[in-house]
Image: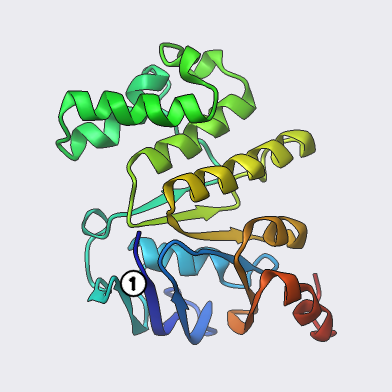
């Protein structure tokens, strides 16, 4: 588990005038589940991309466990990103998909096997380890994609609307899985969503974003009141 400190962080995309994220500061505690909530264009994904290292901030700094990683490469941050797309390797089995990054990291084969089997047993999919992604349902593919992010046991797990492509009943099941895995492995987690109900189900705190501005951060039980007070927001 790790802490994350975003200090005066902002971002402006190339060939644009208006910042996608205006300067803000936010601290995420060790093992906390923080939800970034706001409509499309509010800056949620850009914040996650800066934390992951895919985008360089215009101003500010990013600290993980007190270490400045603002200029660090993606592979040097120990931050794992789970997207709405599954991005599974179609020619690999579930087992190999889950273990691929661990092999790249140089972990011993026995440890890789133990981690893969531990995660898949917890999500009830240990029986499909030898299947290929094309043989799986949409829900199973999304579940494996989430498991692949968790199996690395990263310092920070970030998720960008991973359930948006699922039907409503599968969304509910996947949200429960996300919360269960986060609690089981005590991962410091940032999760972006445009769905307030999802945010309230998942988050210890909700950070509300509007047009690249951080409007406020509240614990889950009072976040809805925060949103209601912003009457000029078009959701």
Q: Which quarter of the figure is the N terminus placed in?
A: bottom left
Residue 57's spot in the image, x, y percent?
37, 77
**Near-viewer residue (199 or 30):** 30
Q: Which quarter of the figure is the C terminus placed in?
A: bottom right
Res 12 seen here: no
Tell me where residue 40 sits by quadrant: bottom right
In the picture of the structure, the residue carrying the numbered disc 1 is: 56
Residue 172's spot in the image, x, y percent?
73, 41
| Residue at image coords 37%, 82% | 58
Residue 73's spot in the image, x, y percent?
22, 61
Q: Is residue 12 above or below residue 115?
A: below
| Residue at image coords 55%, 59% | 191
Tell me where residue 5 sits by quadrant: bottom left
**Near-viewer residue (235 or 79):** 79
Give the left or right position of residue 117, taking residue 213 as reference: left
| Residue at image coords 36%, 70% | 3
Q: How many residues crowd mark 1 within 10 Å: few (<14), some (14–19), many (20+)?
A: many
| Residue at image coords 51%, 43% | 181
Tell me where residue 173 sits by quadrant: top right
Give the left or right position of residue 77, taking residue 31 as reference: left
Q: Secondary structure at mark 1?
A: loop
Tell me how the rendering is colored.
rainbow
Res 215 seen here: yes
Marks counted in the figure total 1
Q: Is residue 206 above or below residue 121?
A: below
Residue 30's spot in the image, x, y percent?
40, 66
């Amino acid at each position: 588990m790790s802490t994350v400190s975003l200090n005066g962080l902002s971002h402006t995309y190339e060939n644009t005038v208006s910042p996608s994220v205006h300067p803000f500061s936010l601290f995420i505690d060790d093992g906390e589940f923080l939800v970034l909530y706001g409509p499309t264009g509010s800056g949620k994904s850009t914040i996650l991309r800066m934390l992951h290292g895919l985008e360089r901030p215009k101003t500010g700094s990013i600290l993980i466990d007190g270490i400045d990683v603002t200029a660090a490469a993606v592979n040097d941050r120990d931050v794992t990103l789970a997207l709405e797309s599954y991005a599974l390797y179609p020619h690999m089995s579930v087992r190999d998909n889950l273990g691929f990054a661990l092999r790249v990291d140089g972990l011993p084969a026995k440890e890789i096997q133990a981690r893969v089997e531990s995660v898949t047993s917890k999500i009830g999919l240990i029986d499909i380890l030898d299947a290929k992604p094309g043989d799986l349902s949409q829900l199973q593919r999304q579940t494996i994609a989430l498991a692949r992010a968790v199996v690395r046991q990263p310092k920070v797990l970030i998720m960008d609307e991973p359930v948006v492509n699922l039907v409503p009943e599968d969304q509910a099941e996947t949200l429960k899985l996300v919360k269960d895995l986060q609690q089981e492995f005590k991962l410091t987690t940032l999760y972006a969503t445009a769905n307030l109900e999802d945010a309230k189900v998942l988050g210890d705190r909700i950070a509300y974003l509007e047009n690249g501005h951080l409007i406020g951060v509240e614990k889950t039980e009072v976040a809805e009141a925060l949103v209601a007070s912003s009457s000029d927001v078009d959701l």
